[in-house]
Amino acid sequence: MRVFVAGGTGTLGRPTVRLLAAAGHEVRALARTPERGALLRELGAEPVVADLFDLQAMTAAVAGADAVLHLATRIPPLARMRRLAAWRDNDRLRCQGTSVLVNAALAGDVKIYVQESITFLYRARGEQRISESAPIDAPRPLASARDAERETARFTARGRQGIVLRFGGFYSAEAPSTLAVLALARRRLFPIIGAGDHYVSSIHVDDAAAATVAALAVPAGIYNVVDDEPLPMREWMRALTDACGFKPAFRIPLPLARLVFGGTVELLARSQRVDNTKLKAASGWAPQHPSVRQGWRAVAAARKMAKSS
């Protein structure tokens, strides 16, 4: 299959491009600079240096592709997440960027369009399992993910195969967000919010990449991409600290967390026990890290963190 990837040098894009190439797909990927293009060549893709927001350039870039993957995001670092202004670039990628890519794909003979989205859209459901039909809401800074999903539905409405992948929280030994969490957790500065009984749904980046490749063969629709065992926050943190040999995390009352982290704490404290059954049934995909209990140990081993440190 001929596959075009936007966001091929990102946290999810790099392992996805590598897996696509290894599976024998002909991969072209968008690069903002020649330097990024060199990285894409190393991963096994033909780089296309162009502007994602240029419709004419994107129409030319995706010409001849069987599938287009939009994996480009720009999530702000933890220290800036409370500022809505820090999400502007990410919002533009998901709103304007998605519209451009969908229009470019529709202008060509592209049959499959895959859009990266997030499970954080779901409303809090306590201990209930969350399937793709569960209610969502999309306050800022989540609204742009819903806009991207609508654009994908527009692709499907034109008789094509539009696929939305709602990913849980990414983590891996190389993900910048993971490195930030580890740096804080080492100093006991990454707290458990409230009682810590709200469920957290995660996915190791390698498993997310494998799911993205598997999604090329599923019917149009929305699919959750999470591990098999979402955990309450207190257990999620215990898995991290035990794997890395850190001291246990502090707890911070929700009112104080609001003062420290701003409005984003309401999103972080949602209980989301997300279910991955639909994608597993449709594709045969299964995560190699069934929960963060195994995943954090893999991260610790890759970062050479001794359990006794």
Image (spheres, rainbow, N blue to C red):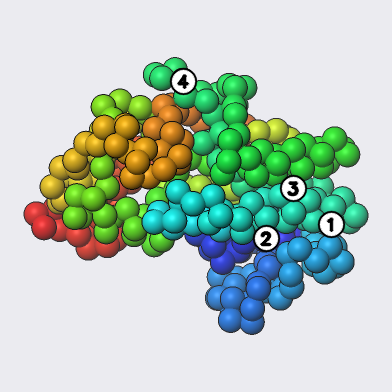
User: What residue did someone put label 1 on?
Assistant: 104
Amino acid at the residue labelled 1: Ala
Amino acid at the residue labelled 2: Val
Q: Is mark 4 on a helix, strand or loop?
A: loop
Left or right side of 98 for 299? left
Q: Is residue 188 above or below residue 147?
A: below
Q: Alpha-carbon distance for marks 3 and 1? A: 11 Å
Total number of numbered labels?
4
Circle nearer the viewer, 1 or 2: 1
Q: Name the foreground residue: 195 vs 217.
A: 195
Q: Name the foreground residue: 54 vs 80.
A: 80
Q: Which residue is drawn at 55% across and 24% down?
A: 131
State the quadrant of the N terminus.
Answer: bottom right
Q: Which of marks 4 and 2 is nearer the N terminus?
A: 2
User: What residue did someone put label 4 on?
Assistant: 125
Q: Which of marks 1 and 2 is nearer the N terminus?
A: 2
Q: Which picture quadrant has residue 303?
A: bottom left
